[in-house]
Image: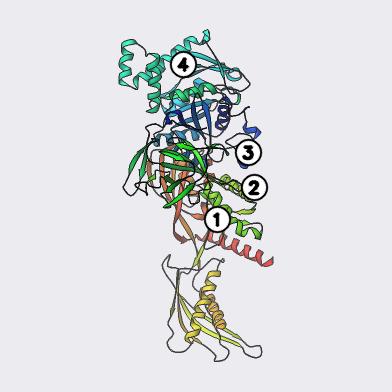
């Protein structure tokens, strides 16, 4: 669908808690708008916006997906957002590309965890919010109870502009409080209504609700308030104008009703979006660049600036960059400048998307959303400009991507997949901003990091289904270290005679503790020729190899100095190999007397939790050997700062989610190493030795 006027565009994010009918609503609106010939359903696995195999099999949205609905000469772009908290970064990305948020709420459950998170994110982005109360045909669905829940959470500016006709299974339509009409829907799900007069038994209720709405709209504008005082009401024209203005300025959060599974309320919702929701025209977007911070205006005649807010990666169709044109016009078969990489991208075919189904268009104008295939260097969050842009460093503001909260070690099941796994992980990370991969330099494990266990399990399933790479998943190893607590002398002597040339090397060393983080030092203090100069590096090499193998539990020995003091050699039997062996034996001898102990990584942890759960979180940290270091008040509650051993944090993400009903989040980073308490140390050493014995037996 080609649009040639920005005022005919509406960009809407469908966001909220999981199981509030966002994907079903997108399908219902598509059917009502004539995009499909039947109502596609999540349970049938045929919706536009849940097209990934994992989404279809699990029945949940994993990433954002775009679709559009033509309605009354307008193009309504929809961005369907995941409802699970572990995918909330996707929702934040969608908010960068929309002009309003349709906050989807379950008519039975009311306000839930992600309802609050979406509301807060929309407020931070200063986006208008409307609320869609879905599943009004379900048992115990209730407008009054849900409205009370919403107003308690978000204030009295949440007001219905519709009332239900019928209740629960009898829900069959809505009363439009703006135009005072009743709209009844057939149960076939086509979403198109027959307009009629308001039922007599609901007329008084509708008039009272309209009066509250009129007063709230009048209060949002001084000019309207004066007219309201003079006439006791607002004219129809002023009411509609006032609603549009109050929504745009976040002074009114209209509540609409529906049962998307049966198409009830769909046409009324589309009418409200066209009539009352803001278009992209005149909107300002923040930028930064060589000339400092600034703003650009959404204007099709202005220079091009487009934001890539999602990347789709498919082994068959390749990479598709989904973008919103913030200003200017992007024609097909043009060139665009990527300000992050500092290079030109060739834009081939432009497309508008229904999920992953593409329709080619000749151009995208300011405010429109579309896709471009096979941009080589462009990633999610990048800004595309005109090749002759005045400031080629200019970039549109983008979200802060949180650090992964959990890591698992992965290993390919087949040795032949060793090479494929790197490319496959890179493609997954192109698509999913919160997924990370690295190789632990100490344990040499490939680590796959994400926002939670479900997130990582989904990534592993994608590796298998998309790229035919199967992996085993393990909790990552804690990179313990061994160190010494006191100086000690060591003597290493290697002597072997078995006929012919023998092997001989002898060295004496002294080891001493160094400070945490200083790793290792080797000092040659031999004067004279007790050990020839060409053999001394072999002594160090043997010590290095031995310290990496560990002494107590197989972990590297660190933070100590070795002094090479004396030794002996043989003119014929000595060799580099012999002195390498002698060095390792000397270190082993010294470590036996040096009070070797185990150290563990300590993480600096910050936990953002609502006030209600502060006590539970602090108690749990205590059980995890955590040491609180401070607390700060935040907009959402309390920020608890603590130092906690890494070994105690491996399962923290699901534990915190359970402890706080999913309302808290955390971030952690490495701080330093500390000695492991003796009781814990004994368990770690015993487990390590048991594991080594098992490997030797195999």
Q: CA distance from mark 1 to mark 4?
A: 55 Å
Quadrant including the C terminus = bottom right
Query: Where is residue 137 shown, x and y percent of the image?
Result: 59, 22
Callout 4: 10 Å neighbours few (<14), some, many (20+)?
many
Viewer-side residue, 575 vs 293: 293
Determine whether 321 is above or below 549 in the image.
above
Q: CA distance from mark 3 to mark 2?
A: 13 Å
Query: Is 360 on the left or on the right of 398, as rendered?
Result: right
Asked if marks 2 and 4 touch (Cβ < 8 Å), the reply is no
Query: Which is nearer the N-term, disc 2 or disc 4?
Result: 4
Determine whether 94 is above or below 196 in the image.
below
Query: Which is nearer the N-term, disc 3 or disc 4?
Result: 3
Asked if marks 3 and 4 touch (Cβ < 8 Å), the reply is no
Give the residue at mark 2.
Answer: 465
Q: Nearer the viewer, mark 2 or mark 1?
A: 2
Q: How is the image coloured?
A: rainbow
Give the residue at mark 3.
Answer: 56
Query: Where is residue 474 shown, x and y percent of the image?
Result: 60, 54
Callout 3: 10 Å neighbours few (<14), some, many (20+)?
some
Q: Secondary structure at mark 4?
A: loop
Give the residue at mark 4.
Answer: 177
Query: Which is nearer the N-term, disc 3 or disc 2?
Result: 3
Q: Nearer the viewer, mark 1 or mark 4?
A: 4
Residue at x 64%, y 33% (from the top left corner)? 43
Viewer-side residue, 218 vs 118: 218
Give the residue at mark 1.
Answer: 447
Residue at the farthest top position: 200
Q: Secondary structure at mark 1?
A: strand
Query: Where is residue 107 shown, x and y percent of the image?
Result: 54, 25
Q: CA distance from mark 1 to mark 3?
A: 27 Å
Query: Is 287 on the left or on the right of 543, as rendered?
Result: left
């Amino acid at each position: 669908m080609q649009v040639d006027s920005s005022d005919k565009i509406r960009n809407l994010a469908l966001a909220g808690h999981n199981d509030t009918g966002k994907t079903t609503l997108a399908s219902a609106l598509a059917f009502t708008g004539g995009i499909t010939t039947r109502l596609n359903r999540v349970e049938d696995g045929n919706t536009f916006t849940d097209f990934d195999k994992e989404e279809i099999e699990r029945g949940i949205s994993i990433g954002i997906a775009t679709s559009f609905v033509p309605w009354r000469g307008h193009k309504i772009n929809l961005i369907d957002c995941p409802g699970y908290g572990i995918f909330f970064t996707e929702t934040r990305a969608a908010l960068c590309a929309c002009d309003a948020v349709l906050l989807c709420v379950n008519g039975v459950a009311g306000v839930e965890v992600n309802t609050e998170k979406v509301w807060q994110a929309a407020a931070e982005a200063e986006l208008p919010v409307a609320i869609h109360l879905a599943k009004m045909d379900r048992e115990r669905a209730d407008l009054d109870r849900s409205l009370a829940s919403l107003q308690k959470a978000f204030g009295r500016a949440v007001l219905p502009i519709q009332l239900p006709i019928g209740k629960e299974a009898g829900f069959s339509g809505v009363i439009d409080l703006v135009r005072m009409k009743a709209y009844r829907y057939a149960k076939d799900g086509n979403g198109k209504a027959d307009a009629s007069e308001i039922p007599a038994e609901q007329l008084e209720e509708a008039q009272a609700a309209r009066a509250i709405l009129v007063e709230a709209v009048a209060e949002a504008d001084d000019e309207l308030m004066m007219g309201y005082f003079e006439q006791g009401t607002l004219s129809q024209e002023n009411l509609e104008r006032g609603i549009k203005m109050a929504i745009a300025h976040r002074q009114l959060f209209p509540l609409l009703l529906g049962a998307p599974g049966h198409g009830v309320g769909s046409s009324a919702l589309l009418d409200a979006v066209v009539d009352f929701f803001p278009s992209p025209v005149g909107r300002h977007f923040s930028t930064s660049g060589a000339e400092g911070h600034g703003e650009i205006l959404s204007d099709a005649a202005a220079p091009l600036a487009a934001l890539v807010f999602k990347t789709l990666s498919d082994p068959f169709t390749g990479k598709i960059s989904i973008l919103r044109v913030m200003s200017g016009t992007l024609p097909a078969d043009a060139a665009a400048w990527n300000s992050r990489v500092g290079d030109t991208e060739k834009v081939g075919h432009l497309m508008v998307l229904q999920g992953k189904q593409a329709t080619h268009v000749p151009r995208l104008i300011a405010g429109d959303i579309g896709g471009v295939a096979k941009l080589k260097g462009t990633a999610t969050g990048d800004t595309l400009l005109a090749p002759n842009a005045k400031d080629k460093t200019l970039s549109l503001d983008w979200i802060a991507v949180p650090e992964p909260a959990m890591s698992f070690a992965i290993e390919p099941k087949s040795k032949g997949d060793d090479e494929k796994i790197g490319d496959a992980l890179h493609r997954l990370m192109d698509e999913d901003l919160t997924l990370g991969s690295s190789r632990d330099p100490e344990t040499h494990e490939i680590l796959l990091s994400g926002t939670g266990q479900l997130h990582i399990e989904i990534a592993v399933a994608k590796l298998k289904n998309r790229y035919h790479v199967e992996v085993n998943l393990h909790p990552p190893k804690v990179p313990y270290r061994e160190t010494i607590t006191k100086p000690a002398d060591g003597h290493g002597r290697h002597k072997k005679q078995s006929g012919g040339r023998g092997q001989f090397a002898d060295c004496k060393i002294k080891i001493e503790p160094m400070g945490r983080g200083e790793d290792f030092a080797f000092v040659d203090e031999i004067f004279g020729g007790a050990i020839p100069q060409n053999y001394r590096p072999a002594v160090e090499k043997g010590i290095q190899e031995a310290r990496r193998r560990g002494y107590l539990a197989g972990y590297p020995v660190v933070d100590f100095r070795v002094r090479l003091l004396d030794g002996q050699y043989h003119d014929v039997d000595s060799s580099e190999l012999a002195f390498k062996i002698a060095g390792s034996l000397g270190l082993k001898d010294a470590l036996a007397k040096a009070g070797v102990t185990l150290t563990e990584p300590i993480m600096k942890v910050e936990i953002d939790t609502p006030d209600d759960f502060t006590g539970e979180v602090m108690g749990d940290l205590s059980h995890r050997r955590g040491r609180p270091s401070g607390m700060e008040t935040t907009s959402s509650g309390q920020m608890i700062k603590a130092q906690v051993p890494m070994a105690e944090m491996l399962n923290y993400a699901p534990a915190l989610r359970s402890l706080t009903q999913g309302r808290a989040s955390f971030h952690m980073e490495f701080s330093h190493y500390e000695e492991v308490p003796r009781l814990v140390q004994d368990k770690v050493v015993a487990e390590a030795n048991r594991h080594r014995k098992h490997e030797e037996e195999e």
